[in-house]
Amino acid sequence: MESKKRILLVDDEPINLEFFEVMLSKLGFEVQKTDNGADALELVKRWKPDLVILDNVMPKLSGWEVTKIIKTSEEFRDYADIPIIMFSAMDDVKDKVEGLELGADDYITKPFNFSEVLARIRAVLRTRELIHQIEHREARLRVAEEIAQRVVGFTEGLHATLASMAEQAAALEPECGDAKPFVRMTKTESEKILARLDELKLAVASLTAEAESIKVAETALHAIKTKYRGPGSL
């Protein structure tokens, strides 16, 4: 059973906090709320929400300041991927651009329509889930590449050893007398093993090529990851 998504509401207007808490809770979200940026930072570390909905104009710390701290501060490095939707009563393009450049994932101007806000919440959460899937695939890909490299090293070493054994068997064959059939059998088996190892090397090469193609395809999604990691991220 999928766990409820956690949403942290940060606004100094009680009516907005109460409205969003009621509506989002009814829709199946788990909600925490606070009326200032300083407490919001503590809740981010303690509760680790899936999304922060953040008003810009607040006491103690503004929404911009909170966003900058979460996205760029070393103290919040483990929380920098938490998406942020900012609210503001200001409809100035410069303000919106500044908020987005600080690392906010979306920007909504008051007064807002709840249906639109809900759609944006779900879109941001879907994007975050996509990023997690990409990261999981990349982790699996790194493990697969490491295994492939080890297999290649092992097969190449074994191939060289068996090739040397086969050469020694061929050199000894004229001198083996009664043991000649045994030597011929050893040589034949060695050749069979060498052939199987060649097949294994080809299979590994094919897997490696497939892994590379996956990496190329996922590179196209790197821009999405960078955007939702915030500025200055890797």
Image (cartoon, rainbow, N blue to C red):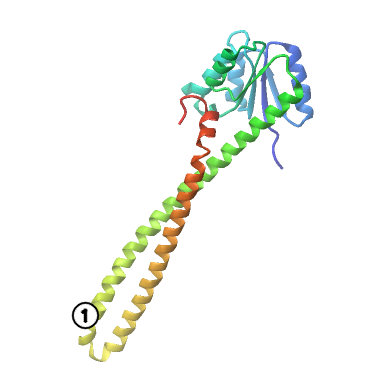
Q: Which image quadrant for residue 96?
A: top right
Circle 1 is placed at which residue position?
Answer: 171
- The kind of residue on which mark 1 rests is Ala
Q: Which image quadrant for residue 183?
A: bottom left
Name the residue at 62% across, 8% down.
Answer: 59
Q: Residue furthest bottom?
A: 178
Name the residue at 74% across, 12% down.
Answer: 14
Q: Is residue 208 above or below residue 82?
A: below
Q: Looking at the picture, tell me which residue is in the foreground, 178 or 194.
A: 194
> Could you tell me if residue 38 is visible in this image?
no
Name the residue at 31% across, 63% down.
Answer: 157
Q: Which image quadrant for residue 198?
A: bottom left
> Could you tell me if residue 153 is visible in this image?
yes
Left/right of residue 175 with respect to residue 193 in the rendered view: left
Where residue 82 sits in the image (x, y, percent)?
58, 28
Q: Looking at the picture, tell me which residue is in the foreground, 229 or 217.
A: 217
Q: Is residue 17 above or below residue 186?
A: above
> Can you say which quadrant of the picture contains the C terminus?
top left
Q: Residue furthest top?
A: 59
